[in-house]
Each structure stands twice: as C-alpha cells, then as structure tokens.
C-alpha cells in the first residue's frame, strides 16, 4: 500500500517565521501534489511536482520533490496569517485509475 | 458560475432519513469523484466516475449510492446512515489526460457538505 505520512500533524507559528512540513512514503510516486484547505472549504491545488529533485516556487512557498520520488517538503518563508490552513500532499496510486492517496495533513496556524 | 459547486453546505439527518448530496462542475472535466474527510484521517476515496461510467467503488457501504446522470453532475444518495458517517463529503472533478486515465493533473474540489447524522 502506498501510504503518505505527513509531519508534523500541527504547527503553530508567529507571523514572519519560517516553517517546513514534510510528506514521506516508503513507496515511489510518479508525482506528488500539494493542496491547502481552509476552514469550511475544499482543498485547493497548489502545485504538482513530477521530476525527482525538482524544486518549484510559488511566491513564498517552496516545494521540493525528493530525488528518489518518495518524499516531498513544503517550506514557507515569512509566514502570514493567510497561510493558515490544512496542507495535504497526495500522489497517484500505481495501476489504479484516477485514484490518489492523500496524507492526513499538517494543520498550520499563523498568528499575527 | 465556475468551478465545482456542492449543495447543501450543511446537512443534519436522522438515521432513518433519506437525503441526497449534489455536485455540479462547470469546468468541462470528464471525471468526478466523491471523497469522505474525517478529522485527522486521510481523505477516503468513495466513488470515481469517468465519462459518466463508474470505474471505482472503494468498498463503500450500500447505504451510500452514487449517481452520475451526465459529465457535469454527480449525486450521492444517502439512506439509513450511522453516526460514524458524520463527516465532510467532498466532490471533485478532473480532466483525464492519459490514454488509460493513469495521469490525473490534480483535482478541483468543491467546498464540501458537512454531514451530521443524529
């Protein structure tokens, strides 16, 4: 089973601080996606990483896909209260049409 | 209206009630999904429809019954639910780009229906 483990489960920081959340698996994924879910809303896709070692930047967010394509990280620089949300990683399951495995998520709270 | 719209946003139902959740997408996608989200657990895939044909039923109890009349609409019919079925039910859509549907470039989710079974 291709499970995704996210850490930490919860992270509370002050505005302006940096943070990193992790998504790890013992299995290889062809790609990984990161979503952010705000309270009362559905997850919103932030980025898809496809190539091992790939680094993608989205404003203050930096996403990295591990060389072996088994893990990924999300780093937020100078966090703002608007970054508060549940961060989910997801990867497509092998030989399973349209089926993605999601991690349980990291709840990030950024206080002013 | 654009994106994926789910109604109702909140639903409280008794265990003997019958209700339906509705999902509509205006993105021209050819695949739609139902997911269940419970606190501190990964999203659980319930059903997948591709081109209006159900391609996945992830061992979901028969008290949940999906319906996909066309590529833009998806329903989840509920009957005789249990309190442990209380959760956020998310609808999503995507565009199948692979010949066999292997690669899905991300979901567009609706805002979800918060279901409480009493």
Image (spheres, rainbow, N blue to C red):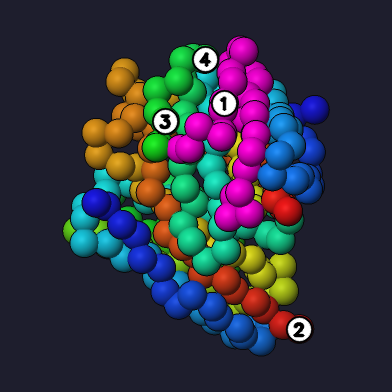
User: Label 1: which residue?
Assistant: B66
Disc 4, SS: loop
Determine which of the numbered discs, if any, sits on residue B24 in the image: none
Q: Residue shown at 66%/70% (left/top)?
A: A84
Tag shown at residue B52: 4
Q: Quadrant of residue A76?
A: bottom right
Instruction: Specify the segment rendered in magenta.
Output: B60-85
Give the number of callouts.
4
The secondary structure type at the circle numbered 2 is loop
Residue B107, image x, y percentages? 52, 38
Q: Which marked residue is nearer to the observer: mark 1 or mark 2?
A: 1
Q: Nearer the viewer, mark 4 or mark 1?
A: 1
On the image, the x and y values in percent for residue B42 come to: 46, 57
Vertical placement of residue B64 versus A81, above or below: above
Label 3 close to label 4 by CB (< 8 Å): no
Q: Chain of mark 2?
A: A
| Secondary structure category for the residue under label 1 | strand
């Amino acid at each position: 089973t291709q499970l995704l483990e996210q850490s930490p489960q919860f992270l509370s920081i002050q505005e302006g601080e940096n943070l990193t959340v992790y998504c790890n698996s013992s299995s290889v994924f062809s790609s990984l996606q990161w979503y952010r879910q705000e309270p009362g809303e559905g997850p919103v896709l932030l980025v898809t990483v496809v190539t091992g070692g790939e680094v993608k930047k989205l404003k203050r967010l930096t996403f990295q896909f591990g060389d072996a394509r088994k893990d990924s990280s999300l780093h937020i620089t100078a966090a703002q209260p608007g970054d508060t949300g549940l961060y989910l990683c997801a990867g497509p399951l092998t030989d399973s049409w349209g089926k993605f495995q999601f991690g349980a998520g990291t709840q990030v709270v950024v206080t002013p | 209206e654009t994106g994926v719209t789910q109604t109702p946003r909140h639903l409280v139902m008794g265990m003997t009630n019958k209700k339906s959740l509705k999902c509509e997408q205006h993105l021209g996608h050819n695949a739609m999904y139902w997911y269940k989200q419970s606190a501190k657990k990964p999203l659980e895939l319930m059903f997948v429809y591709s081109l209006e044909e159900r391609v996945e039923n992830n061992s979901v109890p028969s008290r949940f019954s999906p319906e996909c009349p066309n590529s833009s609409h998806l329903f989840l019919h509920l009957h005789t639910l249990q309190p442990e079925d209380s959760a956020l039910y998310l609808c999503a859509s995507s565009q199948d780009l692979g010949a066999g549907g292997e690669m899905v470039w991300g979901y567009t989710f609706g805002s979800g229906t918060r279901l409480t079974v009493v």
